[in-house]
Amino acid sequence: MAKCDVCGKSVQFGHSVSHSNKKTLKVWKPNIKRVRVMESGRVMRKYVCTRCIRSGSITKAL
């Protein structure tokens, strides 16, 4: 499960291009962490990307 519950960031697809211009499929996965989050007075576990954790989009539970 590589999807952020806050911003919706998920995997992206593309090509790796070699020096000879040969293209192979490539997948970029977001950096997802399972964290304890305070939401509406309750502690929940969510999958959140590190960008959302760092920017303060969530409040971590202690």
Image (spheres, rainbow, N blue to C red):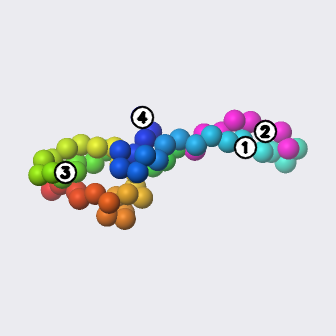
Residue under label 4, please give it. Answer: 1
Q: Nearer the viewer, residue 16 or 55?
A: 55
Check disc 3 and report its element: helix, strand or loop: strand
Front label number (3 vs 4): 3
Give the alpha-carbon distance from disc 1 to disc 3, as whole Å: 40 Å
* Dominant SS in magenta: strand
The residue positioned 49% from the left and 43% from the top of the image is 10
Give the alpha-carbon distance from disc 3 to disc 4, as whole Å: 21 Å
Q: N-terminal of the two: label 3 or label 4? A: 4
Magenta range is 21-28
Query: Which x, y percent locates residue 9?
Result: 46, 47
Q: N-terminal of the two: label 1 or label 3? A: 1
Residue 32 appearing in the image:
no
Q: Nearer the viewer, residue 50 or 57?
A: 57
Check disc 1 and report its element: helix, strand or loop: strand
Residue type indicated by callout 3: Glu
The residue positioned 11% from the left and 52% from the top of the image is 41
Residue under label 2, please give it. Answer: 23
Q: Locate residue 27: give its quadrant.
A: top right
Dot 3, crowdedness within 10 Å: few (<14), some or many (≥20)? few
